Image (tube, coloured by chain):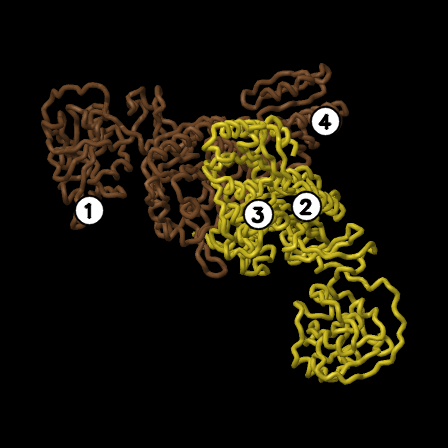
Chain colours: A yellow, B brown
Amino acid sequence: MRTSQYLLSTQKETPADAEVVSHQLMLRAGMVRKLASGLYTWLPSGLRVLNKVADIVRQEMNKAGAIEMLMPVVQPADLWQESGRWDEYGPELLRVKDRHNRDFVLGPTHEEVITSLVKNEISSYKQLPINLYQIQTKFRDEVRPRFGIMRGREFTMKDAYSFHTSDESLQQTYQGMFQAYCNIFERLGLEFRPVIADSGSIGGAVSHEFHVLAESGEDAIAFSDSSDYAANVEMAEAIAPVTEQVPAMSVKTQVATPDVKTIQQVCSHFNITADKTVKTIVVLGAENEKGQQDLVALVLRGDHSLNNIKAEKLAEVYAPLTMATDAQILEKINCEVGSIGPIGLPIPIIVDRSAAHLTDFVCGANETGSHLTGVNWDKDIADYQIADIRNIEAGDPSPDGQGTIEIKRGIEVGHIFQLGEKYSSAMGCGVLNEQGKHQILTMGCYGIGVSRIVAAAIEQNHDKYGIIWPDAIAPFKVALIPMNMHKSHRIQQVAESLYEQLVSAGIEVLFDDRKERPGVMFNDMELIGIPHTIVIGERNLDENKVEYKNRRSGEKQLVEIDNVLSLVADC
Amino acid sequence: MRTSQYLLSTQKETPADAEVVSHQLMLRAGMVRKLASGLYTWLPSGLRVLNKVADIVRQEMNKAGAIEMLMPVVQPADLWQESGRWDEYGPELLRVKDRHNRDFVLGPTHEEVITSLVKNEISSYKQLPINLYQIQTKFRDEVRPRFGIMRGREFTMKDAYSFHTSDESLQQTYQGMFQAYCNIFERLGLEFRPVIADSGSIGGAVSHEFHVLAESGEDAIAFSDSSDYAANVEMAEAIAPVTEQVPAMSVKTQVATPDVKTIQQVCSHFNITADKTVKTIVVLGAENEKGQQDLVALVLRGDHSLNNIKAEKLAEVYAPLTMATDAQILEKINCEVGSIGPIGLPIPIIVDRSAAHLTDFVCGANETGSHLTGVNWDKDIADYQIADIRNIEAGDPSPDGQGTIEIKRGIEVGHIFQLGEKYSSAMGCGVLNEQGKHQILTMGCYGIGVSRIVAAAIEQNHDKYGIIWPDAIAPFKVALIPMNMHKSHRIQQVAESLYEQLVSAGIEVLFDDRKERPGVMFNDMELIGIPHTIVIGERNLDENKVEYKNRRSGEKQLVEIDNVLSLVADC
């Protein structure tokens, strides 16, 4: 491709409204353009990357035995009413009426369509298992689209759905997809982690997310420094300290602590570290049979943070997690929030595993302006439960017993679920089994955010000059930069000859044949992030050489003109 | 691909609601499934065909210098308001509101989006011409979707848009697209015709349609038997007969003709053929300055039919073409419709070229129950105009002066337009030209109905057993049918070995490894339309042979097992 016959559309200025680096660079490097909030046009360079990502996904899905098909973007509402999601799904589901006033939705996912299809097309267990997928345009009407294509409204997704007559079969396909996803992200050249995940609103039990690691990632991932263990911090189990419990030595003592309300103030008042204190968080409890809600105390070590998702899963706690108001606490406990503690509390008490491991700790005395020191579980308080309710932290022991936890940030680009019968049961999707009886199928579903991967790849691979594409998804493999070609017949000749050689060899090359200053060309090719650059200049030509530069390492070397093709082909 | 691990979804029964053969066969052969009116899911076999069509289109577009990009399906309404189409476009434009109550449309075409993009991205004549295209999902809310994917609501289209600073440049790109389209349809293996077309509501002057020829086609195409001339019958020029005019011999004579009203009755009454008569059609005239409408007479040879589109283009005629009522005619002419003729008519008279070529003809006398014989132009009537207002017919001379016209039916699968400044002018899309002045661009646009081609290919290529795919777009090249494999180790061994050989050679093969009777397998593979079949049976194996069958020709031959690969590879 010649730049003179291409839509390069690079920009020098960083667009003011682009918050994250991938969004900034996708705009500056001419990958996408905003059409409206959350809606982006893919310019030629961006589409080349998007298509390469999609091709790798497709190849690995096919290799794993999945079968490609294509469902419509526009779906009839009745299927969503059948599954129940017409009511469950919020305003992110864009609902439309056609000219005959019939209800439709723009598909954010396709569980309903595929379940309805399989129900009609597959009648016998002999046709199973089957794993069907598509790579397709989806729409989700985000309340606040942001970060460019990272959280857009229209996006490209690979979604696969598998159908089974047994859990064993589902688990086998799930494992196959897990492996296919690892293959995909390895081939894409991205640093990634599969992590144990919460299956959220899609339903089902077992699920894994696939994260591209990047400092700017929205999610925190906990993983072991010595094993394969990795989980979204939301989900990662926080075990009790593996050290032995220090024997209790002290006697409970009440101390006046006016103006001491926060853990920080407790620490400085008593001259101790936060891991010798506990904090007590009061939340609304689950409704009882009469619809009444009690309060519940959640007790954590002073240096730990509450994990809302874990807390919400407790039977005693109301979901969504709701903090008790100061007034509710005052009424029930007759004490201000800053002095609450577990001793003598008239409400159920749930203690985190690490807090339960403490001895001789400091806590609020349930008397305004007063704390207790030398407190010990069991001795000072009998009625409490122990549960895992905190966020795992760097330095914690890995829950699989191997190594220590590190925390990295990640961008979720894939998610696989063992869905179970949520949709097949609601929609009556079953087959005749080996015994000749009708049996509801169990399902898996497997998504990859194809367009989001493009942004995630940039978040992970960039420097101050621009994007650094992994070779597998670069819009072009080679940039060919002739310096002042329009003034030198010799440079033009070598450039045209090298261009022809590279194109003939099937190498994707962007030939910068514009009448631009060399600096402009260098900057553009670095911004676009082409992995390999060949620079043709007068001085090196005297020695029959050109300059090769590697975008990622910055390595430069002089290469004989005759060796350019083999050098680049081997990269 | 093994059928046992595939979603074949063939059906024996012809679905009752499928009117055309392509729709019937796409359902029966498991190519598509209906999700809702005009919305279809592409099953695996159908998607394989669709993707092959798209790939050929993409390759030829790239070869012609067009650059691929991708625009959103969902478009903001303000662009459509800017171009004026928000008001012009009827209910086929599906309008939606997002969660913030902002107006959007599901894109039926993308002129607005691309014009807005080019306006922002391209500032200098040096970056032109440029031809940008996408292969993308489109939506048109047809009032009565029918014929399966032939006239669906959601469909796949290739749409390209070119931008120029001069008409010469536009014409050059237009010619390039014309040639690229010819290449595409040739590579698809379809019999097609590029035809001169009416540019309809998209606007612009020059346009060509590309039709796949098929008896079931909705359009009639006139083409020369001895030149490249081809035009939609709507548009094809009907020239006067090339034979010399017969000298006038007769004198005008009035004849009483009670009960003679139609041309057929005139012919039998006077014992002449229809080409010796004229018929006079009275329509509403264009409004004058005062908003009044006169009547206008359109005179055709008795055996010819009026072409509404040509008539509407006349300055004297009201558009849309509207027949005068019997009452209007009686009031103005004082004569019943069956006896109207051009002699002495008190309204403007427009005579078709062929009617004007007649001598000694018969026509109505403008007196109820009366006709004239021996009528001649100029002698009997002085005040009339001549124009081309009839439909061209088989046997007419070709308007390019070469050969005779034949009429065939076609399915429109492509349309190219020289759009001009319709959108660029409305949206202010221009560049600085060589003189440094801002200049509005001129545009071309080039569409191909990618999904429609799949149906059109079937309309042209099928028999009573099913689809006969051209090799280039067949879902699989080879069907491998082992007879009773599950009872014969030898057959299984040969089948597995051939399958492995074919797959290794990169040949797309569908291996029917189901436990089905041979007849079921043959029927399915013929229905799906796979071009080449290899049948493995016990008897032929005794001679180390298998049977090859060609789907299109029906030719069968016995082939040495060792020669199967080379035979199939060379097909």
- The answer for how far apart the CA atoms under marks 4 and 1 are is 77 Å
Determine which residue is flagged by label 2: A163
Q: What's the residue type where badge 4 is placed? A: Glu
- The answer for how far apart the CA atoms under marks 4 and 3 are is 54 Å
User: Tag on residue B287?
Assistant: 1
- The answer for how far apart the CA atoms under marks 2 and 4 are is 27 Å
- The answer for how far apart the CA atoms under marks 1 and 2 are is 67 Å
**Which residue sits at x=37%, y=46%?**
B429
- Whether labels 4 and 1 belong to a single chain: the reply is yes
Disc 3: host chain = A
User: Tag on residue A16?
Assistant: none
Disc 2: host chain = A
User: Tag on residue A465?
Assistant: 3
**Which residue sits at x=35%, y=33%?**
B171
Question: Looking at the image, do the residues carrying marks 1 and 3 touch, with CB atoms under 8 Å apart?
Answer: no
Q: What's the residue type where badge 1 is placed? A: Glu
Q: What's the residue type where badge 2 is placed? A: Phe
Q: Quadrant of residue B43?
A: top right
Q: For this rendering, which residue is in front, A247 or B45? A: A247
Quadrant location of the N terminus of chain B in the rendered image: top right
